[in-house]
Image (spheres, helix red, strand yellow):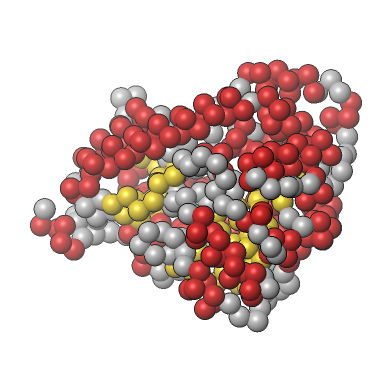
Amino acid sequence: MSRTAATFHPPIPEARRWLDGVTFPPDRPLINLSQAAPVEPPPRALREAMAGFLGDPSTHLYGSVLGNDELRAGLARNWAAHYGAPVGAERVAITSGCNQAFAAAVAALCDQGDEIILPTPWYFNHKMWLDMNGMRAVPLPVGADMLPDAEAARALIGPRTRAIAIVTPNNPAGVEYPPATVAALFEVAREAGIRLIIDETYRDFDARTGAPHDLLTRPGRDETLVQLYSFSKAYRLTGHRVGALIGSPALLDEAEKFLDTVTICPAQLGQRAALWGLENLDDWLAGERAEILTRRAAIVDGMARIEPAGWRLKGLGAYFAYLEHPFAMSSAEAAPRMVRDAGILMLPGTMFVPEGDAGGARHFRMAFANADAAGLAGTFDRLAALDWPLAGPQAGR
C-alpha cells in the first residue's frame, strides 16, 4: 500500500463534490462555510507593492532554504513584541504555508512508528500527514468545553510519543485555549521530554488582547516549544503559501534538510509581500480582526434563534464555530443534504474525529471567514427553517 493510501481523501475537495448537479436560485445562493480562507485579494496597497517586487530580478530566483533574512528578522521582532520575550531570527524559518511548517517540524522530530498526541476533534491535515509518514496520531478527546486536559494527555504518553500538537485558536472548534491550559500542556511535555507543537495560524484574530500564553518566557522552551504561523490569513496571501516555523536553532537545522528537499526555498514574491505586511499593515490587520469579531457576535445572536430547536454552540473563535445539531441523522448524512435543502455547505464533525467516534456525528464546523454578518443572519434563517427528524428528547418538539 502506498503512503497516500494510508489516509483519507482531503475533506475540502470531497465536500465541494456535494455541489455537483445542484443549482442555487438567485434569491437563495450558496452560503459556503466549508473552508477557512479569505476569498478577497490582499489590500490594494499590498498588491501594488507586490507589483513593484516583480521588477526586481531577485524575486524570480532561488533564496535561502529557511527563508529570506529580512522576513525572518521581521517576524522575530513581531513575535518578540507580541509574546513579550526575546526571539532571534535564528529561531524563525519561513515555510511554504503553515501545513509545511507542521510537516517540517514532524520530519525533524519523528521517525516511522512514532506517535503524536492530537486533541479531537483534530485538524484533519495534521492527521493526514502523520498517516502518510507511518506515524500514529493518538486521539486526546476534549471535554465539554472543547479543551484538552493536560493530565489526560500525560496518561497517553508512551515510549514512542514525540509531541503533543494543538491548534489555538482552534481549528475546527474555534475555542481559544486559556493560558492555563496551554501552560499545563507545556509542563506535561517538558516533564516527559517531548515537544509541544502549537499551531497559531489564527493568532491575529484572537478575541483576547495581548499574548495568548507565556511559554516563550518559561524555562525549557528550547527543548519543548515549537510554534507554527501563517501569513495567509493575516494578509490574504493564501495562494502565495507563506508560513513559519518558530523553534530552537537545533530544530530548524534538522527541518532545513526537509525543506531543501521539498521546496528548496519559499516563494520570493510571497515572502516579500509578508514582510511588507508586517511593516505596513498593522492598522489594516486590526480592522480585519474587528470584522471577524463582528461576525463572531453575529453567530452568538443567530444561535439564540436555533437553540430552542436543540442546536448548541460548542466552540467559537477566530474563523470557526463548532455546532452540535439536533437531528436524528449523522452530520455525515446531513451535510450533503443541507446543500440541497438549505443551500449551506458546512463540514460534518465526522471529518475531524477518528473513525467510529460518535461525537463527530453530532457536530458541524462552520467556517465563517467568507460570510459577513448579513450572510450569517441568512444562514441562521435557513437553519431555523430545516424541518428534519429530531433525535432523542427533541423528537417530540
Q: Nearer the viewer, residue 104 or 224?
A: 224
Foreground residue, 275 or 369?
275
Q: Would residue 9 be visible to someone looking at this image? A: no
- Examine the rendered structure and indicate whether residue 370 appears above or below residue 84: above
Whether residue 220 sits left or right of residue 168 in the image: it is right
259 relative to 33 in the view: left or right: right
Which residue lies most toward the left here? 396
Which quarter of the picture shows residue 360? bottom left
Q: Residue at x 28, y 37 (%)?
A: 301
Tag count: 0
Please state, as top left, top right, bottom left or bottom right, where the N terminus lies in the image: bottom right
Q: Residue at x 73, y 72 (%)?
A: 111
Left or right: where 147 falls relative to 303: right
Residue 303 spot, x, y in % from top left: 27, 42
287 is higher (above) or lower (below) than 33: above
Which residue: 60% across, 64% down? Answer: 186
Can see residue 66? yes
Locate residue 380 relative to residue 135 in the image: left or right: left
| Above or below: residue 383 compared with residue 103 | above
Which is more toward the observer, 66 or 127? Answer: 66
Q: Position of residue 107 (x, y in %)?
A: 74, 63
Q: Position of residue 375 (x, y in %)?
A: 36, 30
**Residue in the image at 46% along x and 40% along y:** 207
What is the quadrant of residue 192 in the picture?
A: bottom right
Along the viewing direction, whichever of 193 and 122 lies nearer the viewer: 193
